[in-house]
Image: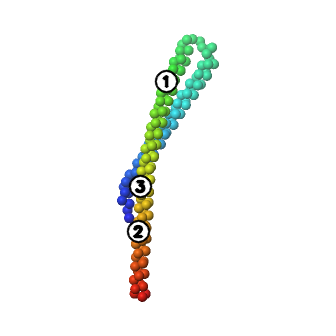
Amino acid sequence: MKKFHLEQVLKYRQEMERMCKHEFASAKQNLEHAHDQLMQEEAQVRDLSHEFSHRQGELQSIDELCHYINFFARKREDIRNQKERVDMLGSIMNQRRDVLLDATKDKKVLESLKDRKAEEFKLAMRLKEQDFLDEISIQKNEQGI
């Protein structure tokens, strides 16, 4: 069978798609991890807020109140930073998804071309075979066999 003349390009496209899949999976995993961290931070603040509301009347000193206030301020900042990180990682994941889709389309175009060329080759071979058989038949008829 005739070799596909763009086979090297197709192999390159397949490798590019594989790499893009890996990068997309990595970006998705990073996003999920960052989102989980954000959920943990928010749950920690909710729990401490609930504890603070129950202990508000029991606080012994201004220092205890300051510790709670400082902790809440730090956690608000951590949550804000984590939300920004989640947004950034979401953007990166979307970019990698777009790159992956483009790589997949490029590969599929070449695969489609390869399949079409293979079918054209098979058809051409069938036509040559049919012409050959027709020629043999004509020669037999001319020879009276």
Cα gap from disc 3 to disc 2, whole angstroms: 21 Å
Q: Residue furthest bottom?
A: 144
Q: Split into 4 quadrants, where in the image is the C terminus? A: bottom left
Task: Tell me if residue 17 can be seen.
Answer: no
Residue located 59% across and 25% down the image? 47
Q: Residue at x 55, y 30 (%)?
A: 40
Q: Residue at x 42, y 85 (%)?
A: 141
Picture quadrant where residue 126 is located: bottom left
Q: Residues within 10 Å of mark 3 (few under 14, many from 20)?
A: some
Q: Which residue is mark 2?
A: 124
Q: Amino acid at mark 2?
A: Ala
Which residue matches tag 3? 110
- Looking at marks 3 and 2 on the same chain, the residue that comes earlier in the sequence is marked by 3
Image: 36 above or below 17: above
Under tag 2, what secondary structure?
A: helix
Residue 120's spot in the image, x, y percent?
Answer: 42, 64
